[in-house]
Image (cartoon, helix red, strand yellow):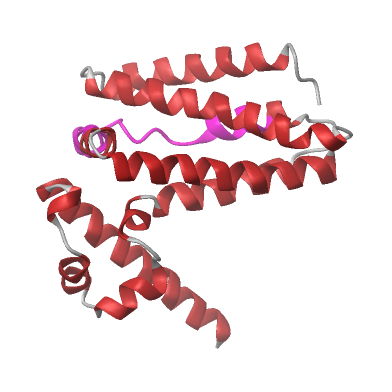
Amino acid sequence: MSGLRELKKQRTRAAIADAALELFLARGFDEVTVAEVARAAGVSDATVFNYFRTKEDLVFERLDRFWTRLIAAIEHRPDGQGVVDATEAFLLDQEPTSLSAEGDERLAGISRMIAASPALLARERASYDHAATALAEVIARTTALGEHAATAAHLILGVHKSLVAYTREQVLAGATGQALADRVAARTRSGYALLRRGLSA
């Protein structure tokens, strides 16, 4: 029974986030109210705030779930695999979001929306900070880096942050489809190769 309740919560959370993103992309983040998101998702305003603390959190629901999966992949990496290799492997294994016209349009819309909003950019930075804290705990437990675990976490996520910035730049310049996916994959490999030279844990 508890499993069914949890599944229902996950579906409700996803439905709210999906409804919010569609409204934000259609009209702009600042032009949409939480009440409108609630109506579109078929829930009350209070229900929205039960799942999302702030309006900005609605945009970054997928990023927050991404961090959970990334950190779990690093924590449960195969024996003998370093944290940098585990991070790179996880990122390269992700399905690109830009291999269809619909995906291209959606990614471009999200990129424009975040780039144009100081509030969303601040929320994105906060998301990275929280992820770095969680990753540092995993690195401290699973490597011999000890007091340097936090530095390692920030370096690893710093490369990812640069990849997001590069992807956003490419998207806003008109890059799409497989060409974009190939460029991001190449930048991922080169970015972590650069880091690997100085971080061998």
Q: Residue at x 33, y 54 (%)?
A: 56
Magenta segment, which residues?
86-108
Q: Is residue 41 above or below residue 30?
A: below
Camera sees residue 56 = yes
Foreground of the two, 140 or 193: 140
Q: Is residue 76 visible?
A: no
Q: Position of residue 183 (x, y in %)?
A: 40, 15
Instruction: Name the image quarter holding residue 194.
Output: top right
Q: Nearer the viewer, residue 1 or 38?
A: 38
Q: Is residue 23 above or below residue 179?
A: below
Task: Say whether residue 100 is magenta.
Answer: yes
Looking at the rendered structure, the number of numbered marks drawn on it comes to: 0
Q: Residue furthest bottom?
A: 1
Magenta: main secondary structure equals helix
Q: Is residue 74 magenta?
A: no
Task: Report the residue that reaches farthest toward the right.
Answer: 144
Please name the residue shown 40% across and 54% down the image: 61
Whether residue 187 sits left or right of residue 112 in the image: it is right
Residue depicted at 25% across the width and 80% down the height? 44
Quadrant of the rendering where the C terminus is positioned: top right
Q: Nearer the viewer, residue 107 or 30?
A: 30
Residue at image coords 14%, 47%: 28
Residue 167 x %, y %:
37, 24
Query: Where's the N terminus, which quadrant?
Result: bottom right
Residue 179 position in % (x across, y down): 33, 16
Residue 78 quadrant: top right
Q: Is residue 17 left or right of residue 7?
A: left
Instruction: Determine whether, in the image, residue 166 is placed left or right of residue 132.
Output: left
